[in-house]
Image (spheres, rainbow, N blue to C red):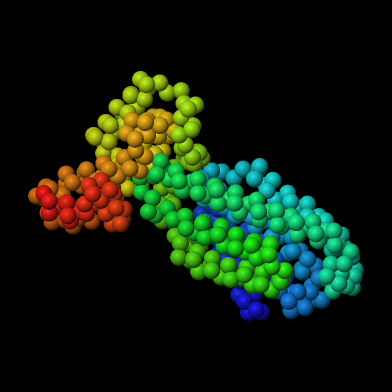
Amino acid sequence: MLYLFLTGIILSAFHSFVLFSKNDKTISDYLLACWFSFSGIPLFSYYLVYTQLYLVYPSLTVVGMTFPLAIGPLLFLYVKYQTNLISFSKIDLIHFVPLIIVSLLFIDFYFLPFETRVAILENEGKEYEIQGLIKLVAIYVSGLIYIPWTLIKLLKYKKNLNNQFSNTERINFNWLLYQIVGMANVWVLILFLQDDRFIFGSVSIFIIWLSYFGSKQINIFGNNSNKIAEKKTLNSKTELVNENFETTKYLKSNLDENTIAEIHENLLQVLDKGKAYLNPELTLSDLAKMLGVHPNNLSQVINSRTNKSFYDLINERRIQEFISRVQLLENKQFTLVALAFDCGFNSKASFNRNFKNSTTKTPSEYLKSL
């Protein structure tokens, strides 16, 4: 167990340092760095208890015991700012009010004589029973609120990806989902187990697992310099603030039938003549900017006039473009995948899936039928 705790502490500190030292840090980078820090410090506090070093460092032992109250809020905010390119809102600091209040309950502990602090810890928090109970209840409530709340927010965003992006293969939200599920498992142990060794052991395993999985994700611990990050950075920060282009919002739309028809006609011209779908990173916001309309209004027009999502509409056009190009003699020298990439797809799997959805055949089967 000792080595497990040490591994979790070291990895937390290491990843916090890596994230804080990244170039072009985003808000989510800062939040993830804080998440690792606030996960590692309570683990370090328990390590002092486990090794009886609390007899030497009583204040360091207590300081981390309230930090689990920051884990849920940090995870929620990390998901929020990972799925929205928006500026940090000071109102979000309200999520840390419980941490501050509970921490203040123990503030007088740090001003007690050294021997008194050690004696309190040796007697399992004697004279601080009420503060300890409040802290425990607050941690339980924090997990029960923030984990479901974060999961719902992420699933809503995933549900509406097809209304925003024309290629979703590179938008990997498994990293976020695994964080939430992992945290949920840890909170279940906190709720039903009374053995701190298993609770903090599970925290260490979770940190180790996140370190492994996070190292395989694009731009989690590396610098934000890849193509997708650049594309998103260039977009206006307000373009993706509203992540839910839900049909219910259309009920409040002031678009009349003439306006809808006009937007639809302009949309067809941009697709037919401009071939905007050839851009593999095309988003709903990009297309709306070309048409000079709000993304919500464009989404309404697409859904109502074509009965398709933005994703399906654009990829259907890409398939039609591919079919036109693959029959040209001058394109016989190119592979099917190369032509698919020229038509706006960014992965072979995406091309094959969309082709079969559109034609009920694989690309090879379709070519044989010509």
Q: Quadrant of the N terminus?
A: bottom right
Q: Residue at x 12, y 54 (%)?
A: 368
The part of the image, by quadrant, that contains residue 165 is: top left
Determine whether, in the image, residue 249 is placed left or right of residue 259: right
Residue 171 location in percent, x, y? 42, 53
Residue 88 location in percent, x, y? 59, 45
- Residue 197 visible in the displayed image: yes
Query: Furthest residue to the left?
Result: 329
Residue 41 location in percent, x, y? 68, 66
Determine whether, in the image, residue 259 is placed left or right of residue 143: left
- How many labels, in total? 0
Depth check: give the residue in front, 345 or 365.
365
Instruction: Using the image, determine if residue 351 lies above or below residue 57.
Output: above
Q: Residue at x 85, y 58 (%)?
A: 130
Instruction: Using the image, determine if residue 300 lies above or below residue 170.
Output: above
Q: Residue at x 27, y 31 (%)?
A: 269
